[in-house]
Image: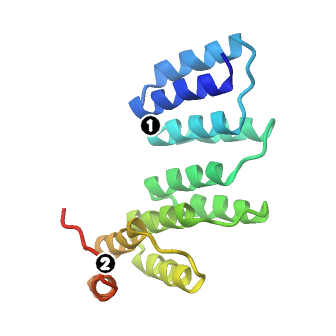
Amino acid sequence: PDETTFNTILNTCVRAKDLDALNQAMTLMRDHKIKPGVPTFNTLLKLYARAGKFQDALDIFQEMQQTVQPSIVTYNTLIDGCAHRGDMDRAALFFDEMLERGMNPDICTMTSLLKGFGRSNNPVRAVELYEAMKEGGYRIEERTRYAVINACLRGNDRHNAKRLMREMIDSNLHIRAR
């Protein structure tokens, strides 16, 4: 087996949110003397962040930096994990670190930040970021629009939520009902 084989197993553990199986797979990986690369570390980060074990994800990130360079996927995973917890101060630190390393935020980065501003009840920051994204030439995806609208609704900013929905209607974009 090689790293790709183990990454397939690890991704299955992520989808199942099965930490025990993941630990067994990592033990086998070590037994076979296969060193984890960026994809393996990113998979581990994703599982720990999704499982609510964010300190474990931070420990993995520290270990990762000793052997390989984090990628934009690494930072997006960490930012998303912070945003999911509403920890926008830490998300901002990872965002700044990503920029310092010369990485450009992508639509995944920005959408995670928008979701985080919603979870932390900060619709003003969400709308500011969304407007900056439009001005910066980002291709705004449906999930990005819904993230900013949800941030407005969570933060009781009905005015901007209605304005953004009107913007979608005026652009002939479909509005989903839940």
Residue 147 image position (x, y, % from top left): 38, 68
Work out which quarter of the rendered image holds the N terminus and state it. top right
Residue 7 image position (x, y, % from top left): 59, 29
Q: In this view, does 125 lie to the left or right of 4?
A: left
Dot 2 falls on a residue whose secondary structure is loop
What label sits on residue 51 in the rendered view? 1
Q: Which residue lies furthest to the top in this view?
A: 31
Q: Please say if 67 is above or below 159.
A: above
Q: What amino acid does circle 2 point to? A: Leu
What label sits on residue 173 in the rendered view? 2
- Residue 87 visible in the displayed image: yes
Q: Please say if 60 is above or below 96.
A: above
Dot 1 falls on a residue whose secondary structure is loop
The CA distance from mark 1 to mark 2 is 34 Å
Q: Mark 1 or mark 2, which has the lower sequence index?
A: 1
The residue depicted at 51 percent of the width and 65 percent of the height is 113
The residue depicted at 18 percent of the width and 67 percent of the height is 177
Instruction: Please say if the residues under marks 1 and 2 sit with CB atoms less than 8 Å apart.
Output: no
Residue 20 image position (x, y, % from top left): 47, 19
